[in-house]
Amino acid sequence: MRLKFTKMHGLGNDFMVIDLVTQHYKMDEDTVRQLADRNFGIGFDQMLIVEPPTSPDVDFTYRIYNADGSEVEQCGNGARCFARFVKDKRLTAKNEIKVSTSSGKITLHLQSNREVTVDMGEPVLEPKAIPFEADQFASEYDFEANDQQLTLGAVSMGNPHGVLVVDSVKTAPVESLGPIIESHPRFPQRVNVGFMEIVSRNEINLRVYERGAGETLACGTGACAAVVSGQLRDLLDPGVKVNLPGGSLFIEWAGKGHHVNMTGPATRVFEGQIYL
């Protein structure tokens, strides 16, 4: 069958977005992997699926697949592209869009300057819920990986994140240490790994090794998790500019018990269709 799609990116974190509200197709892991191949397919970090709502209090269902075919709970850059996509495709006329994900419900706000603010919900800090193996919550944990003794923050933004503070993101061992921490047994569902450089109390530089995708140019949930971890460690104040390789996001968190808000761009690259 012929399937229409849109290629989008959020600060270089790129997506194949598919409307399964007006089209009908059952996606599987093998197909995702084939389409994700940058030489023989479309090429993307994640595939985003727009589906009809499953409950009356949301507008859409939002599903996310990594390039390796695994389905994941959340993607912040993808959420901004999702919002821009459903509005531009006239699937909704709303500027405040409520969607359900496998990790819960989030709200997307379309701004007049075409940027999107995403209410990412309240960060999960309890180790068992992240999930992360630790006896009790701490702002940072002693952690051993690759025979190195590290200090790591653990946060879930609907998907698990480990956050390391580094002197410089330019020299951070993202390629060597990222995959080791990603599959570390203390993270039973694997983990996204953030390497955070503190510029000031309101600005950080960040690189993220994403679970199932490798290092990407930007990671929205990673930016949120890094800011939360930085504030819990008393390294950051509320309201932080996060500089990623693909561009910058603005993250706001007022502390425990409050939601995290992320603001940034979403860009359409091209429209296409493929026969499956």
Image (cartoon, rainbow, N blue to C red):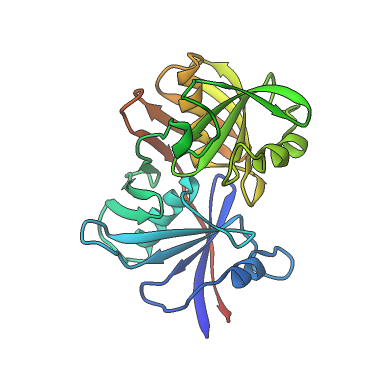
Q: What residue is drawn where x is 37% and y is 43%?
A: 118
**Which residue shows up at 57% across the image and 31% down it?**
243
Q: Is residue 238 above or below residue 110?
A: above
Left/right of residue 124 with respect to residue 209 in the rendered view? left
**Where's the C terminus, which quadrant?**
bottom right
Image-based side of 258 in relation to 221, left or right:
left
> Among all residues in the image, which is located at the extreme front?
135
Task: State the residue lying farthest toward the left.
Answer: 56
Across and down, in percent, residue 21 comes to: 36, 72
Q: Which residue appears farthest toward the bottom when viewing the image? A: 1
Q: Is residue 143 visible?
A: yes
Q: Position of residue 104 (x, y in %)?
A: 35, 49
Write the residue at 58% across / 29% down.
Answer: 163
Image spot of residue 64 (x, y percent): 49, 58
Please state which of residues 100 and 182 is positioned toward the viewer in this rendering. 182
Res. 202 visible in picture: no
Where 126 falls versus 96 (above or below)?
Answer: above
Q: How many marks?
A: 0
Report the side of 25 relative to 93 (left or right): right
| Image quadrant where residue 206 sits | top right
Q: From the viewer's perspective, is residue 264 above or below residue 197? A: below
Residue occupying the point 41% across, 72% down: 20
- Residue 27: x %, y % from top left: 51, 72
